[in-house]
Amino acid sequence: MTEQQPHTEAQISLPPPNFFESEGERNRPRIAFRRRFPSNSNYPRPGVVWLGGFKSDMLSTKAQRLEDWALAHGRASLRFDYSGHGESEGRFEDGTIGRWMQESLALIRGETQGPQILVGSSMGGWIALLVARELERLGETDRLAGMVLIAPAVDFTQALIWDKLPEPARQDILDKGFWLRPTAYAPDPYPITRALIEDGREHLLLGGVIRSHCPVHILQGMKDPDVPWEHALRIVHQLAGDGVSLTLIKDADHRQSREEDIARLLAAVEGIA
């Protein structure tokens, strides 16, 4: 459920990020973000928000290219790192789906204006749909202009990790509080904590109707070893109340970071916009 990619020299040389701190939560990690506006300061068009994946960061190639596209098309752009990720404060091991969702919601409400197009990659797809549910609760669904979801790992802590774990790994999580999950995206394994699994169960979406309150376009690779393409079909089925389209890419993997994948992503965002 990750999408780590090498960072280009241009990305590494970016100015330092800004930091967001939720009001009344001074002991919580500060969240690093980068907010860009088009040269036309009126920017009446919906903005674009990047929601990255598990163990990913906002310096990924897709996040940078999305920002470039937004500015070139007169749209504001927001990207940020969840706590314990990238340039944000906090320990990765302390993170949960609920915490990362609340951080995303706070950034979207506090650092954007008007309707937004949420672009969620892997875990970011789950986060985007959870943010939509929270915005509905707050009576703010008018903030949602559309979504583009790349290999959305909805309910991944349960459906794609816990349900597939061998018993020894489950026992490690229950007894030790974590299990080190090998990954092809980094030299060191990722800690899967008991808190992550248990909190994830409080935010499951696939048991009922999912509402996005805006049009959705899902991009799913059929050679994705982390999120099976059948998982995307299930999400489409349960997004029954909103317009949704699904593009299956026969030879794409989980990252979808090839030039043709990025071109497809930007075309999907433009189509939603």
Image (cartoon, helix red, strand yellow):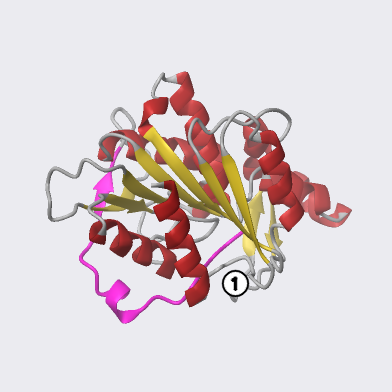
Please indicate whether residue 38 sits to the left or right of residue 168 in the image: left
Q: Is residue 76 above or below residue 252?
A: above
Residue type for callout 1: Tyr
Q: Is residue 19 magenta?
A: yes
In depth, the one of 85 and 131 nearer the eye is 131
**Is residue 51 shown to the viewer in this render?**
no
**Is residue 172 shown to the viewer in this render?**
yes
Q: Position of residue 29 (x, y in %)?
A: 37, 45
Query: What residue do we see at 51% from left, 74% from top?
Result: 260
Dot 1: element: loop
* Image-quadrant location for residue 197: top right
Query: What residue do we see at 65% from left, 31% from top?
Result: 240
Query: Residue extending furthest bottom?
Result: 9
Please indicate whether residue 70 sits to the left or right of residue 204 in the image: left
Q: Position of residue 125 (x, y in %)?
A: 55, 47
Q: Is residue 175 above or below residue 68?
A: above
Query: What residue do we see at 13% from left, 42% from top?
Result: 42
* Image-quadrant location for residue 190: bottom right
* Image-quadrant location for residue 174: top right
Q: Which residues are magenta?
A: 1-21
Location of the N terminus by quadrant is bottom right
Q: Is residue 265 above or below residue 252?
A: above
Q: Is residue 170 magenta?
A: no
Residue bearing mark 1: 185
Please indicate whether residue 137 sits to the left or right of residue 44 in the image: right
Magenta segment main secondary structure: loop
Q: Position of residue 179 (x, y in %)?
A: 71, 56
Query: Residue extending furthest front?
Result: 271
